[in-house]
Image (tube, helix red, strand yellow):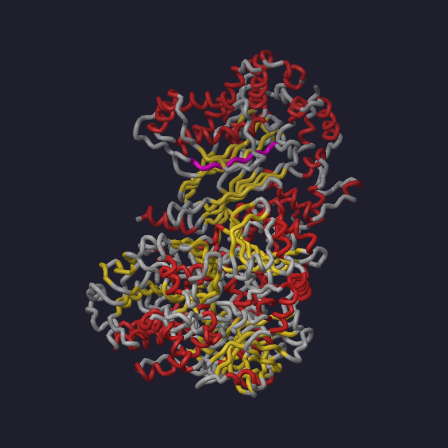
Amino acid sequence: MPVASQLFRGWPRTKILASSLLPCQHQSHLRPVPHQAPSIHPSLSWRPHPPSRGYRVTPHLHSYTLTPPQVNSILKANEYSFKVPEFDGKNVSSVMGFDSNQLPANAPIEDRRSAATCLQTRGMLMAVFDGHAGCACAQALSERLFYYIAVSLLPHETLCELDAAVEAGRALSPILQWHKHPNDYFSREAQSLYFNSLRTYWQELIDLSSPGEIPDTAEALLNAFKRLDNDLSLEAQVGDPNAFLHYWVLRVAFSGATACVAHIDGSDLFIANTGDGRAVLGVQEEDGSFTAHTLSNDHNAQNDDEVARIRGEHPPSEKKTVIRQDRLLGLLMPFRAFGDVKFKWSIELQKGVLESGPDQLHENEHTKFIPPNYHTPPYLTAEPEITHHRLRPQDRFLVIGSDGLWETLHRQEVVRVVGEYLTGVHQRQPLTVGGYKVTLGQMQGLLEERKARTSSAFEDQNAATHLMRHAVGNNEFGTVDHERLSKMLSLPEELARMYRDDITIIVAQFNPHVIGAQRQEKQS
Amino acid sequence: MLRRLLQPQGAALQGVLSHRRAVSGDSLPPLPSQARVVICGGGIVGTSVAYHLAKLGWTDILLLEQGRLGAGTTRMCAGVVSVAKPISIESQMADYSNSLYQQLEEETGVNTGYVKTGSLCLAQNQDRLLSLKRLASRLKVMGISCSIIKPKEISKLHPLVNIHDLVGALHLPGDAVVSPPEVNRALAVAAAGQGVQILERTSVQQVLVERGHVTAVETDRGSISCQYFVNCAGQWGYELGQASEVKVSVPLHGCEHFYLLSKPLQQPLPSNTPVVMDLDGRIYVRPWQGGVLSGGFEKNPKPIFTEGRNQLEVHNMQEDWDHFEPMLSALLRRMPELETAEIRQLVNCPESFTPDMRCLMGETPGVHGYYVLAGMNSSGLALAGGAARYLAEWMVYGYPTANVWALDIKRFGNLQSSRTFLRHRVMEVMPLLYELKVPRWDYQTGRQLRTSPLYDRLDTQGARWMEKHGFERPKYFVPAGKDLLSLDHSKTFYKPDWFDIVGSEVKCCKEAVCVIDMSSFTKFELTSTGDQALEYLQFLCANDVDVPVGHMVHTGMLNQRGGYENDCSVVRLSKNSFFIISPSDQQVHCWSWMKKHMPSEPQLHLEDVSWKYTALNLIGPRATDILAELSYVSMTPDHFPSMFCKEMSVGYANGIRVMSMTHTGEPGFMLYIPIEYALHVYNEVMAVGQKYGVRNAGYYALRSLRIEKFLAFWGQDLDSFTTPLECGREFRVKFHTDMDFLGREALLQQRQEGVSRRLVMLVLEEHDTELDLWPWWGEPILRNQQLVGATTSSAYSYTLERHVCLGFVSAPGGLAPDFVTRGDYEVDIAGQRYAAKAKLYPFSSLLNQQRRRKDQLDLGSLNPE
């Protein structure tokens, strides 16, 4: 298999040349008609240059315009929104709720999202996962990572109780309350495998911790990330007697995913990020405008620290080859990721695992492919970078998005769109006259302007959907252009990926009153 | 800012009231251990109740206020006292309040800020002007001066109003503005002067009840034993009601209400500038300290305090400019010159609203001695004087001196107590305050709470529904093929779009047979082991109910003064059991009236069986045929005379109570069907009735039929101030026996003295049904150009092809028989007078016709001789 390196250049927004690098072509292997997949490849390879946005629209696309309701039904298909219930003023959460949404470009979509409330500790978890080379790894993360985090956060006593309950066959009190869109599925087959790995993990935690010890959140996040990646790798090495599961764990390990996780407990916000997802805080200034405060660093070639880290981890002889064309070993865009054992295991291990693997792997020639200049593995880590932020009353919302969002909209623009949407919809920023001299006429003008702005946001009940509408349909003036939106959404499956990436967005809204009160409490 | 503005007044208030209070603000005067009356709520309503009770000589009164006097809604209310109210009794109260506030300064020396500004209700369209004209003629009946004026005259009265889009206005010269906290203070000062004790910063926690009577009130500072408790807690009235040992339902719910204060205009607005109510713009504007105060009743109100009193306090409610935008635009459209006026503040002042836009007053049905005056629908200031006066009379004399049934808290029961219902309903009620109200509008929210088992069947057959006491009743049935949309959206003061539909239903009642679902009626069963039931009923009822088993009697239940507390039909089911049928809205009132007078006799058992029976009214000459066919029993008058009740089988269903009366004077039967048989019986009746031309009909047809036959209904025509002698029902009073009954003394006396008012039937002549305004109720009646009364209900008679109004005429000093028969009568509909023929008895032709047709009629209910 000639690995066409120019293909990578010609395809800058794909994280990895998925189809040719991986042991399994997820589409072809999962679909009943195995020959469908190759038909995609010619379309990928006949385009040696990056397609510029909207540069080439085939004639049949021109004739096909979506009506606004059609556009809405596409944009809203995956929207989800959760409001934290209030109990008579008591137990009020610093998170009022969140809106999330996904727009596929790949088929099937390779992004995943998760959100859950920790039931045995406090706090809420939200995450966006961006898979590459298939969705298997991202899917596994979306099901498993929160459990690893939640378990890492549990104090020694709770862990002991948990294990005792499992031992005695008693019902477990749930650890997480998931907030899932109906399309966010959990794979049933692998649950017991996952559970066993998780249990081994908490048993180790029991051994390592001592009674009365409260786990540190940052450390817990770090451990959970590393442990899960380790488990993914181990499960693939050990395999499973069930052929399907064996194949599944290999798919998970050979595909990859980035993760951007937020843990919010009261006024403490932790971001654990691995890869090029991003979390940005919307901060409202005193004049009512919004500014973006980025809480995570992208792990890719644009980040000099990351470039230095990777170069430092490998001998000087590899200085040229370890990062080529802004990609890890010339192949992978994110510099940190879960899975992707092709960048982590030794050549021997890769060959060994593949040889003992199920037959499906051998049908694919690309499985045998080893990245070029592969001398001193591992080249890749899942270790997250952790940011802690104490929420302030002016911190109004948090946007977590996959790189599909950040590539299309500048973070400042993202924050502006969301901020104006939220203030428009909820009129959260009430007008006050204060001591200023305002005449009735001036006030009327001001109110009419606000009303006009609100009605444009009226179409969406979901901040993430509204942001998506802008991400896909924004014109040069920063407003949504229906024609453009319609064209982008009506692209056929096989073309969509050339014009846009999967987009996943979570917008969490904070409750400034609660945050203000909690800060005061802590200070006093 | 407003708080700062009002602070000095508040401080002064404390000075006046609390000479008892120690220097350090923390120590409060001691709590007395008992008082005759404890009033909870130191707003304008509570202090006014205290004031009026003291005026009537009750001075052992304790007024409790959880915060400061007048610190709630009262402090922030806009201060307009206007008589423009939707119902006459409220206008009457406002009129009294106005004169009370006017003389208050003289009485107490407190400057109440009273300025007689007058007010202008603007009309932007002809329909609005019509409604104002109707209001004007109603006000004239009460002797309140008012006039309809042209746009040009408006600008003479008010310098800022833009008249370009106006068609006219109602000018009420007597209306006034006051400073509500000062009025509150004046009332408190006057009450305190009479010996009323006023305690601030004392909150009521529970009302203790023993054997159905109020006994004590528990406060955060100890308990006080008392005989009477008055709930004037305003916004918190609902919760306070729930905080009674026996829960009391006070159906009200808060909504945020916004008004704007401007700084003084460059050319300050004179303080006597009239108040402007731009109803179509949903705003009001009054002069305020050289500037204006303007608020409104928006289409999309914001309900508040649904979950009770949470962390939000009345004082720090947030301003919401975006919400106020439509009202600001309306204000600037009406008064463009205000554009340059500077904003002082937007005030958010929650107001409480009730399910029917009328306030709640009177004794609660469940607990004796527990009175309520709350839910003022943002007219608290205007109504406080009058309403509190009537309430005080009610407490002292046992009844108020005017008919306040429309405001009686007993019109509601527990069924209106759901917070969800209240929240939804008040969102409709608040905008309705300024909405154009046409005859016979219905509430859209909080519906389908109580329904008959036939609801779905009737609905699919085109029923249009109205609601009474939570119960859905069919108005009429839209025939298949009619344009439903246009029917539902028409609003008119003229001939309504259902005219022909109801006409055909009436025709069917006259010629064939119709079925009306009348399940909403209140139904009681009274039983006893001995003859206690009979004795008890004989005392309660004016008519003789000692009739043979199976007979029924129309009778009033009268009060001491001989007035109707209830008008019902009593069926003697067996020697010692009776079935009592009352109007739907009597469910709570009649129950409490009967319970109140019930001897504590364990053998006597009263049960509310309203929910157990579905009532079908078969009206028309062919009803006999249908029932005969369904029961294999001859239903002819020989076998089944009028005013007779038999339990029989209809179709497969047994135990159906069939009564030969229809509430319309038409031949036919009422069927009281245990609900599980309802669908069966209905289906059978409709199937068998096919060949007799049966069809569904609604209450509009019923109304037309009963009014043309001069049948008065309680709640519309009859009230607790009407005696049987005044409505030609002497024949329904057991004068022939010497049996004592409630109200007998008063009736005998009245018979001696003669009546001074009389219910009459007025048939409009030369009234063009197509082109003229239709009468509704409340229209003035004139005799020889002199105002002699007002109508109480009206309907178009399809048989007479005329409008028929029922109403009272009065002649002070005695009404001679020829007062009615001689004299030129006219009915004033929105200022236009229509000649009418007044009658004391129904048209015999209507009755004869039926006699010819079927020789069967509940004559007893109609013919006095």
Residue B532, relative to residue A229: is it above or below? below
Determine whether, in the image, residue A208 is placed left or right of residue B259: left
Q: Which residue is rendered at x = 59% and y = 55% of the image?
A: B635
Q: Which residue is rendered at x = 51% and y = 29% of the image?
A: A143
Quarter occupied by the N terminus of chain B: bottom left
Residue A78 at least partly seen? yes
Q: Which residue is rendered at x = 57% and y = 78% of the image?
A: B839
Task: Magenta stretch: give its range.
Answer: A110-118
- Horizontal and vertical percent position of residue B738: 37, 70
Q: In terms of depth relative to the viewer, which is nearer, B508 or A377?
A: B508
Determine whether, in the image, residue B738 is placed left or right of residue B613: left
Q: In terms of depth relative to the viewer, which is nearer, B113 or B525?
A: B525
Q: In terms of depth relative to the viewer, which is nearer, B445 or A498?
A: B445
Residue A114 is covered by the magenta coloring: yes
- Horizontal and vertical percent position of residue B115: 42, 82
Q: Which residue lies furthest to the right in this view?
A: A59
